Amino acid sequence: MMAAVLYGKEHLQVEPVAVPTIQSGDILVRVKVALTCGTDVKVFRRGYHARMIVPPAVFGHELAGDVVAAGEDVTKFSVGQRVVAANSAPCEQCYFCRRGLQNLCEDLLFNNGAYAEYIRIPARIVERNTYPIPPHVGYQDAALVEPLACVVRGFEETSPRPGDTIAIIGLGPIGLMFVKLAKLYGCRVIAVGRRMTQLERAALLGADELVVSSEETNPVRTVRELTHGFGVDVAIEAVGQPQTWEWAVNMVRRGGTVNFFGGCPNHSTVNLDTAVLHYSEITCKASFHHTPAYIRKALDLIYQGHITASFFVNNEEPLANLLEVMRHLMSHNGHLKTAIVP
């Protein structure tokens, strides 16, 4: 089969490799679509991911496809079935799993290899985090489930209420998912982004106010002006930069909640005013990854038609063009997703 193999920093080759072999509990899936992801762009730029992938390896992790082979112990799926598989599954036995924190599982099993004609789904993911795709749902829609599950989990952990005002900083695909989700929850959304194209997309998804962030503007002041100096109930940072982490804290009201969703580069530090955190009782949270329960919640949103690929995917390319696509995404931060069709 043809597959995209990551060899190191910005070193990617689409080349022939052996079709994966499966064990008794595995399934082999013919990839119908794999979606690009900001994490994949980071992996491409850095040449590795400490937890998810060590080169040389086939990479990519947002996919949907058809079962073409199933191990003898597989009972949940059969050949010909349309499926979507998450990129991980927890052990359900460790300290964190027993406390409902499966995303922090000490033995979290990751799976990569979506940028290929076929992918092996290991037994644990088959059993705990793979799902059938209903006939009315397209492959691109289903493949959105992994990032959407992360967003749903991050959003719910901020404990929003209908009518809350929420600032969403960063309007790439993840930020736009937060916008859409917040509107589904009945919240007022202030979208903060650098480019007019991003702000226009946020408006199409229902954002109530748009704030341009640049060296010449002060988005914190603008957000506070839009809330009569009060501050927002929730601020969600979806960029992953120390400056925007600090903005988020300074945008919330007393008793407000900040979600540091965007992961900053390694060894980053932020400067936060301890008096503001303490006397204003600011709750600061961070969200990483998803759990099977949130994968199921995200699938429900997709299967009910609340979230579709038309909001977040604006291009389609063959697998042979993946290197060009990655280079483009690396130089166009905030670009929407591209559907890679092997």
Image (tube, rainbow, N blue to C red):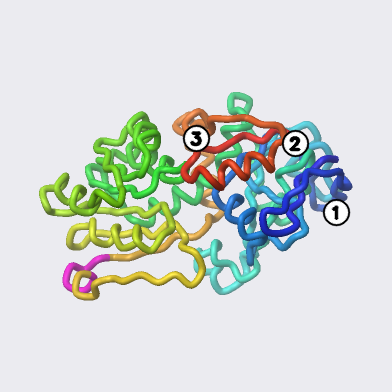
Q: Residue 27: within the magenta?
A: no
* Camera-side residue of 324 and 75: 324
Instruction: Point out which mark residue 312 bears.
Output: 3
Nearest-to-viewer mark from 3 and 2: 2
* Residue 221 screen position, x and y as percent: 18, 52
Residue 23 image label: 1
Residue type marked 2: Ala
Report crowding for label 1: few under 14, some 14 to 19, many 20 or more residues within 10 A (C-alpha): some
- Picture disc at residue 320: 2
First along the sequence among labels 3 and 1:
1
Contact between labelled residues 1 and 3, with CB atoms less than 8 Å apart: no
- Disc 1 and disc 2: Cα gap in Å? 29 Å
**Residue 235 left/right relative to 72:** left
User: What residue is shown at x 17% (from left), y 51% (from top)?
Assistant: 224
Mark 1 residue type: Gln
**Residue 235 numbered tag:** none
- Residue at 61%, 55% in the rendered image: 45
Q: Is residue 278 magenta?
A: yes
Q: Nearer the viewer, residue 203 or 104?
A: 203
Labels 1 and 2 touching (C-beta < 8 A): no
* Figure quadrant of residue 189: top left
> Disc 3 vs disc 2: Cβ atoms closer than 8 Å?
no
Q: Which mark's residue is nearer the viewer, 1 or 2?
A: 2
